[in-house]
Image: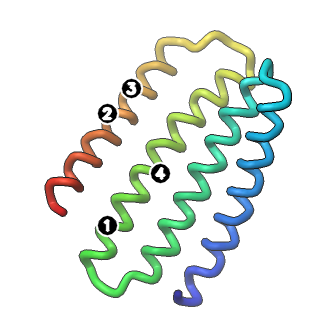
Amino acid sequence: MSTLSIPAVVMASISFYVGLYHLLIYFRRRQHREDLTFALMCLATGFYAVFCAGLYSATSVAQGVQWQRAQFIALALFVTSFVWFVSDYTHQKPQIATYVFSAFYLFALAVCRRDSSRRA
């Protein structure tokens, strides 16, 4: 692990802790769905930071490409959970834009996943 990846690992640890904490809060009071979507958003942020640390420690271009694909997947999950968190936090019914953003990023995630499985 390089010294450049230490801040990313610290950020991932904090994000995982906050995400797991809010997941536990959600299991105690299930009527507050914003705790669930915030937890998913924190976990996606944690995975993104872990993948950043992996990218900083990559020793070849091929490894770097794999880490960047993983970052894109985490970013797609983050954006999807962020859109749903905003909808839950403001207590508004999900609008058509929420579904469109979610569908777009989940489709992009599926395309990225399929593309990476073809190249492996």
Q: Position of residue 4 (x, y in %)?
A: 56, 84
- 114 horizontally vs 85: left or right: left
Name the residue tied to disc 4.
Answer: 74
Q: Quadrant of the C terminus?
A: bottom left
User: Dividing the picture into quarters, in which one does residue 92 lie?
Assistant: top right
Q: Residues within 10 Å of mark 4 (few under 14, many from 20)?
A: many
Q: Would you say 31 lies left or right of 41 here?
A: right
Are there few (<14), some (14-19), or many (20+) residues within 10 Å of tag 3?
Answer: few
Q: Which mark is residue 66?
A: 1
Q: Along the polypeptide, which appears first: circle 1 or circle 3?
A: 1
Q: Which kind of residue does numbered mark 3 sit on? A: Ala
Q: CA distance from mark 4 to mark 2?
A: 13 Å
x, y percentage for residue 66? 31, 66
90 and 2: which is toward the camera:
2
Is the Cβ of the residue at disc 3 closer than 8 Å to that at disc 2? Answer: yes
**Figure check: 37 above or below 55:** above
